């Protein structure tokens, strides 16, 4: 009876209809929708800029810096999504020589190392953002420049959390989890 109660409470916390799973689905939907919208806007703005330069010999006033920041947002958003899906770029030489539980432990350690690096970059990104806020630079139509750079600490923070979750999942199930795309999707 006690074991069934523990299993039932675990399903409520981690199951497909749990609050965590619902939040993960909402975040997934927001990420996927926003990256599609961002890509569409980037294409439209780039085509408008090129067309303006070809036909009218001048482009949109501040389109180039905006395009640069849109590419930054798109790249970092793609990295966040790749980390969510455990489909990020890896150099996987070790899996040719090691398999099973030892490989799972090694992957858990590499995920933990990646989490540490990403969280360190989050801290650096926050310090960079604080400097930008202090300098009070503006870009387009008086919008503060730091708003365009906000993606840096946010994306590295999300990747750090996701790598940490992957490390824990890998550590809990070292022989079954860890092949790209396997396991429960994390926040």
Image (cartoon, helix red, strand yellow):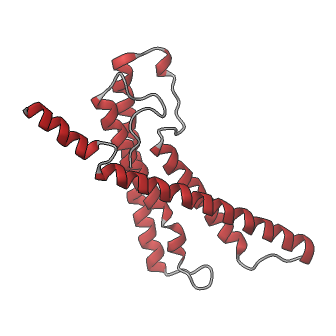
Q: Residue at x 42, y 15 (%)?
A: 98
* Vertical position of residue 138 compared to residue 69: above or below: below
Camera sees residue 173: yes
Task: Give the number of callouts.
Answer: 0
* Vertical position of residue 102 compared to residue 172: above or below: above
Q: Nearer the viewer, residue 73 or 129?
A: 73
Placement of the N terminus among the 4 image quadrants = top left
Q: Position of residue 8 (x, y in %)?
A: 19, 39
* Left or right of 50 in this view: 99: left
* Vertical position of residue 96 compared to residue 23: above or below: above
Q: Position of residue 126 (x, y in %)?
A: 40, 64
Q: Position of residue 19 (x, y in %)?
A: 29, 53
Q: Nearer the viewer, residue 131 or 27?
A: 27
Q: Nearer the viewer, residue 89 or 1?
A: 1
Q: Position of residue 9 (x, y in %)?
A: 18, 42
Q: Residue furthest bottom?
A: 142
Q: Residue furthest left?
A: 2
Q: Residue at x 51, y 26 (%)?
A: 92
Camera sees residue 121: no
Q: Residue furthest right?
A: 55
* Left or right of 70 in this view: 9: left
Q: Nearer the viewer, residue 36 or 64?
A: 36
Q: Residue furthest top?
A: 97
Q: Residue at x 35, y 49 (%)?
A: 21
């Amino acid at each position: 009876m006690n074991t069934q109660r523990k299993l039932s409470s675990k399903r409520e916390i981690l199951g497909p209809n749990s609050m965590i799973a619902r939040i993960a689905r909402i975040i997934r939907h927001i990420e996927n929708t926003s990256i599609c919208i961002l890509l569409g806007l980037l294409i439209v703005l780039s085509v408008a800029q090129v067309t303006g330069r070809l036909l009218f010999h001048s482009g949109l006033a501040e389109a180039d810096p905006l395009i640069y920041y849109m590419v930054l947002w798109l790249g970092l958003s793609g990295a966040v999504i790749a980390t969510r899906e455990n489909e990020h770029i890896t150099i996987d030489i070790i899996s040719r020589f090691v398999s099973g539980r030892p490989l799972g432990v090694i992957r858990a350690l590499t995920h933990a190392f990646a989490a540490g690096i990403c969280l360190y970059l989050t801290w650096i990104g926050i310090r960079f953002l604080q400097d930008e806020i202090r300098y009070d630079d503006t870009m387009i139509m008086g919008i503060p420049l730091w708003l365009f750079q906000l993606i840096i600490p946010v994306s590295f923070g999300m990747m750090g959390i996701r790598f940490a979750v992957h490390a824990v999942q890998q550590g809990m199930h070292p022989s079954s989890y860890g092949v790209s795309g396997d396991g429960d999707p994390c926040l």
